[in-house]
Image (cartoon, rainbow, N blue to C red):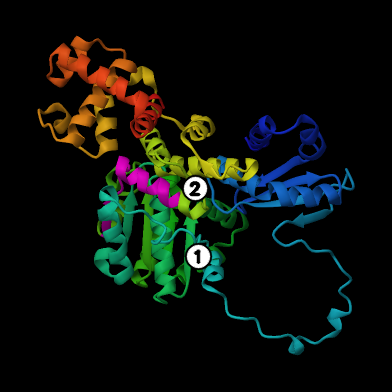
Amino acid sequence: MEEKFWDEFLNFVRPNMNEHVFALWVEPMKFIRWDQAEKTLEVSVPNPMKLKYAIANYKKVIESLADDFFGVQGTDVRFVLDTNKDVLANKISISNISISKNVSENTAHSASMMPKSAPLSLDEKLKSFGINPQQSFENFVEGQENKMAVASALQVVNCPGEMGNNPLFIYGNTGLGKTHMMQAIGIELIKQDKVKKAQFISAQTFLNNYVKAARTKDYDSFRQDYESLDLLLIDDIQILVGKEVTINEFFNLYEILLNNQCQVVITSDVPVNQLKGFHQRLISRFSSGLTVGMRAPGLEMRQAIVERKAQQQGLELGEGVSFYIARNIERNVRELEGAINRLKTYAMSFGQRVIDIDCCRSVISGYITTTLSHVGIEEVKKTVADYYNVRIQDINSKNRRKKIALARHVAMYLCRELVKKSQTEIGEAFGKDHTTVMHACNKIASNRETDSELNHQLNILEQSIKG
């Protein structure tokens, strides 16, 4: 899988480069390895000149693509100067390029002469607890679909460790923001100094650490790492299903943490009662706290997420682009973020200042989840209603208000042009006779030739419906 990432990087940059430039500067770079736990990616370059070029031109591009490909945030690319094919000795981190020196003169100084270390900044403290500082409430888009989850999270922030809030169990499908929500709780509690020691950990890492402790018979150290916590954030608890011994260990640890009034936050891709393979006593403990689900975002919320993520990335989207992305990427937030990351990478690589509809469609085609073959009259009505901010029942009504009449006529026109329905079929779907449909379609077609604003709106809608 890791090697496939490098193929994706090469395929991404090659089409827009001169072949000679590609062969001279890009081809000599070689993928070495990806470390999922550390979120680091190593790439070798043959000489210092190409190292400087790679840092200046491909650092952010590779990191952005890697974030998208591996489903992480904050990838650190490390270039390795490959002066010796047998030993890749000169590892150079692009975030902190340094040259090894003889440090013997420094060892002459006594430890008492060393300055005291400065207190950790908030970001450093969060990272030491495994929490991503970017996953804050400020960066979380709230909508109708996750209102209850946000309220529950804030309740925990206000009263951590209280019986009714402990644990907080957040469930929902992949990519809906559960991990973001969980880390936002941690950030806020640490920022407000309500907890001193916290840990964000995936259930998979917990499992791996326990297996390692079992192998070395060092259970005490394993338990001590957790028993002193004020806040435990454990992600994807369903991974422990079927791991009987690890579940028992987690149950015992969980009891200790709750007795110590440690706040526990758990995420899962299924509700508590669907955690098959967990003991009933653990299910009962999970259910005794606060349980909340997260739903997939609707169109309005998806559009808000796209606009927020683009703003955070410093990416300028042309008119209608956020609607196009939100309309065509429906499954989850992670795919929306992936699309924005890809557009940002494209903009940085090829100097695209503003992303327009055509560019967007070309770059994120792999994320599109709707296809024209599945689009019918009702789908067209819904898209048009969303775009003009009217209700479908308004489009179907006899209301002649200018905004509603325009939406109705546009929907009829698009049904004829894109869905290829007859005027009789369209009339039946809209509750109109075929002559009314014909008049509406001809009017839109004619006005499109002279009204640039209408033509622009139709372009956006057509691209959105086509996907």
Q: Residue shown at 69%/46% (left/top)?
A: 58
**Above-or-below relation of 206 to 367:** below
Residue pointed to by mark 1: 223
Q: Residue at x 89, y 71 (%)?
A: 102
Q: Residue at x 75, y 47 (%)?
A: 54
Residue farthest left in this picture? 398
Name the N-terminal-most of marks 1 and 2: 1
Residue 236 image offset from top left, x and y in percent: 42, 48
Identify the disc placed on residue 316.
Answer: 2
Q: Position of residue 265 (x, y in %)?
A: 37, 59
Task: Tell me the amino acid under the disc marked 1.
Answer: Arg
For label 1, the crowd category at 10 Å Cα-Cα, with few meaning under 14, some 14 to 19 and many 20 or more, is: some
To which quarter of the image does residue 409 belong?
top left
Quarter of the image for residue 378 reads top left
The x and y percentages for residue 179 are: 42, 53
347 over 96 or under it: above or below: above
Horizontal placement of 153 versus 329: left or right?
A: left
Q: SS at mark 1?
A: helix
Query: Quadrant location of residue 342?
Result: top right
Q: Quadrant of the C terminus?
A: top left
Q: Secondary structure at mark 2?
A: strand
